[in-house]
Image: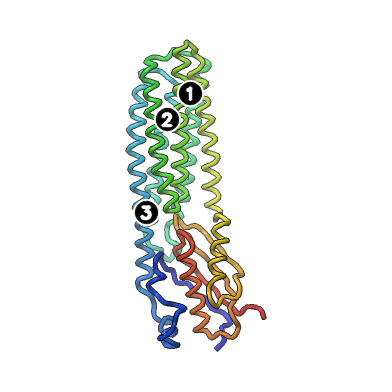
Amino acid sequence: MRAANHGHGHGHGHGHGQGHGHGQVPGGGPWRALRHLFVPHSHDASERIDSALESSRAGMRALWVSLALLGATAAFQAVVAVASGSVALLSDTLHNIADALTAVPVGVAFLLGRRPATRRFTYGYGRAEDVAGIVVVLVIIGSAVLAGVESLRRLAEPADMRNIGAVAVAAVVGFLGNEIAAQVRIRTGRRIGSAALVADGLHARTDALTSLAVLLSAGGAALGWRWADPVVGLLITAAIAAVTIGAARQVLARLMDAVDPALVERATGVLGSVEGVKGVERVRLRWVGHALHAEVTLGVSHTLSLVNAHRVAHDAEDALIRGVPRLTAATIHAHPAPL
């Protein structure tokens, strides 16, 4: 039997390669290959689900930790902002509140991502993270607009700052709270492959830098410069706008199924090293939540039987899942390579 076309669509999880010996069929012969062709691997799905759940739990832990930090930071700053009348601190506080609130849509997305695929949502609900990323960007934009409007109003109607020392302390507290939250979110987001969580962390990191800018407004107020506070507030607004652009680009790229070209090159190299693969004709990668899915077209020898073509495709799938980070499922199509 010749292998004219072969569709192979198992979804294997990480760490699965050492449990099988596909492609190493000594002792098994044709019977082992035929058995593999028709007998499903019950543990593959469970490993994939366990991996996804663990990623989701890690994301939720990062959100809870950062939410607690930012919530406490924003509450302290809000009290000082009201007592001092500092518009720069008010801008920073508004942004910290917005940053804390963005944990809600991202957390909902992580919870949705745990739901199994259905006939309607055949890839599952992982793309909810991309929707959450859009919500995060919109919240950042809203906080920037509020901060800018208040800063312009105070610039037109200057006022003295009260409790300057408390404002300086609040600025330092804001920096520390945001930087810790940023590190938690960015590290976890990159580890589990969540663009929404990374965008949220970059947002918090910018907040940390803008919190330090509040020190400038406090210094200006100490020197009697009434204009310094609203000017710093506008600078903070500009910084928020800058991070908004960066976060929006990342989120929109994910919505357009953009991936790092280095991942495609890595996948191509891994597939090319699999025994029996004569050529790698097409590699497609896409993010579904914080997991990668692949669709691959391979060329194999036209002399292979259907069983052996299946074995090559399965070996390629195993190698791909082991060799590409965050890749949890692959669909391999093998057909006779040109003579």
Name the secondary structure under disc 2. helix
Disc 3 target residue? 56
The residue tagged 1 is: 150
Is 106 above or below relative to 223?
Answer: below
Q: Residue 324's spot in the image, x, y percent?
A: 49, 62
SS of the residue at dot 1?
Answer: helix
Question: Residue lying farthest right?
Answer: 339
- Left or right of 220? Residue 284 is right
Residue that sits furthest to the top in the current view: 224
Front position in the image: 70 or 152: 70
In the image, residue 153 above or below residue 248 = above
Residue at the spot x=39%, y=33% of the render?
97
Location of mark 2 (residue): 94
Label 3 to label 2, Cα distance in Å?
28 Å
Label 2 – label 1 distance at C-alpha: 11 Å
Residue kind at label 1, given as amino acid type: Glu
